């Protein structure tokens, strides 16, 4: 488990262009929505005195007025998007099975489609652990994209079942019956916490199965996604301790990134420094995302003897170590 984590970390370190590419794709996908919101705010402020106040700091009176008069993407400009509050809002939305605001749904869909397209190339590059060139990278993307789209249909069905049916049963039916006769709020809190743990465990297991199904689809060049999903399930079942442990270690790394962002997030400030800190957080989040994929790939290859897939080409002259042994005549 620790070996797979460190191996994955080194694979990500040797693939800086993957980090840069994913960061740029995230930035470009968010740009149209940002420009639209920028135009709305600029139009609303105009040459008013509130414009100067907005430059100097957050004017909550103007902000409330803007929200009251806005629609569409303007309704997403709420205080919760600033600093670390945005992270808490996203995590709370996942825990409570609430989707993103409707104006940004298309951005989320676009992000999912782009990620699905790039995933085959990312896993192929991380599995080989050596430079493969842009042509080979996008060829791997093209080979895997339709396979992963088919796998996404199965994933959508499973997650819809978990977040709609199971979540509703746990929190809309079971939880009210558990607390019906309680008089202590603390007991109700622990009941809800326990249900979150059960729900989280189910989502974690599904997430692990789909993660290793993707890894097996790329490393073993599987065309059948039903076969890949079955193989991913078997791998998680047989290596549950290692898979969960590795996921936990990666999650601790992610929590570390969140904690750093919590310390550095500028709160209500909206300036160049705030933008730079936000972009740095996105870069670190991309690194963690790649670390999840790289370490899971390393764990799979180590357990099922697919290490030959990552074998680097034999060193050749003049890059061979033998070149260093040649001294002056």
Image (cartoon, grey):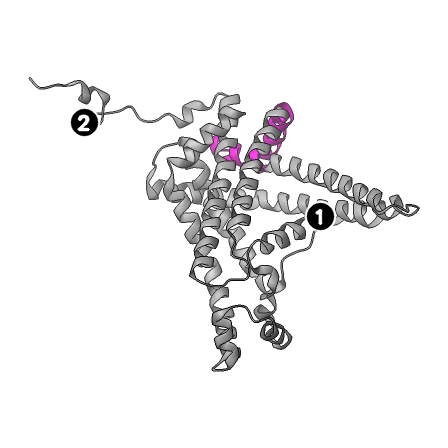
Which residues make up the magenta segment?
A: 211-240
Tell me the element at label 2.
loop
Name the residue located 37 percent from the left edge and 25 percent from the top edge: 311
In the rendered image, which quarter is residue 128 located in?
top left
Q: Gap between marks 2 and 1, in whole Å?
A: 57 Å
Figure check: 109 above or below 184: below
Residue 318, which numbered label?
2
Figure check: 305 above or below 120: above
Q: Are marks 2 and 1 in contact (CB under 8 Å)?
A: no
Assign the N terminus to one quadrant of the image. Answer: top right
Tell me the element at label 1.
helix
Q: Which residue is mark 1?
A: 163
In the rendered image, which quarter is residue 190 located in?
top right
In the rendered image, which quarter is residue 224 located in?
top right
- Measured from the top left, where is residue 79 in percent x and y? 60, 63
How many numbered circles does the render carry? 2
The front one of 62 and 13 is 62
Figure check: 206 above or below 64: above
- Measured from the top left, where is residue 304 in percent x and y? 52, 22
The front one of 111 and 143 is 111
Judge whether residue 228 is colored magenta: yes
Disc 2 crowd rating (10 Å Cα; few below 14, some 14-19, many 20+) is few
Name the residue located 62 percent from the left edge and 27 percent from the top edge: 234
């Amino acid at each position: 488990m620790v070996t797979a984590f460190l191996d994955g970390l080194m694979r990500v370190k040797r693939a800086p262009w993957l980090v840069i590419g994913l960061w740029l794709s995230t930035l470009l996908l968010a740009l149209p929505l940002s420009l639209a919101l920028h135009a709305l705010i600029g139009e609303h402020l105009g040459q008013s005195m509130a414009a100067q106040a907005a430059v100097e700091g957050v004017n909550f009176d103007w902000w409330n007025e803007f929200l009251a008069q806005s629609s569409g993407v303007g309704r997403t400009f709420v205080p919760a998007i600033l600093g670390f509050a945005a992270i808490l809002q996203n995590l709370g939305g996942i825990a409570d099975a609430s989707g993103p605001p409707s104006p940004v749904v298309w951005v989320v869909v676009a992000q999912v489609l782009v990620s699905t397209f790039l995933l085959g190339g990312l896993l192929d590059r991380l599995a080989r652990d050596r430079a493969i060139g842009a042509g080979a990278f996008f060829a791997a993307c093209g080979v895997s994209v339709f396979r992963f789209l088919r796998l996404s249909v199965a994933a959508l069905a499973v997650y819809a079942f978990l977040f709609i049916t199971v979540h509703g049963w746990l929190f809309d039916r079971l939880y009210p019956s558990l607390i019906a006769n309680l008089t202590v709020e603390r007991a109700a809190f622990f009941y809800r916490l326990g249900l979150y743990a059960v729900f989280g465990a189910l989502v974690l297991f599904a997430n692990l199965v789909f993660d290793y199904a993707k890894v097996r689809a790329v490393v073993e060049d599987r065309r059948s996604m039903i076969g890949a999903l079955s193989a991913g399930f078997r791998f998680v079942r047989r290596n549950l301790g290692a898979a969960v442990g590795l996921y936990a270690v990666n999650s601790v790394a992610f929590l570390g990134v969140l904690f750093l962002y919590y310390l550095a997030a500028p709160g209500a400030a909206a300036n160049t420094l705030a933008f730079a800190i936000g972009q740095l957080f996105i870069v670190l989040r991309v690194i963690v995302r790649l670390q999840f994929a790289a370490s899971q790939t390393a764990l799979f290859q180590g357990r099922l003897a697919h290490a030959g897939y990552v074998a680097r080409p034999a060193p050749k002259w003049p890059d061979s170590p033998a070149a260093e042994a040649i001294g002056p005549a």
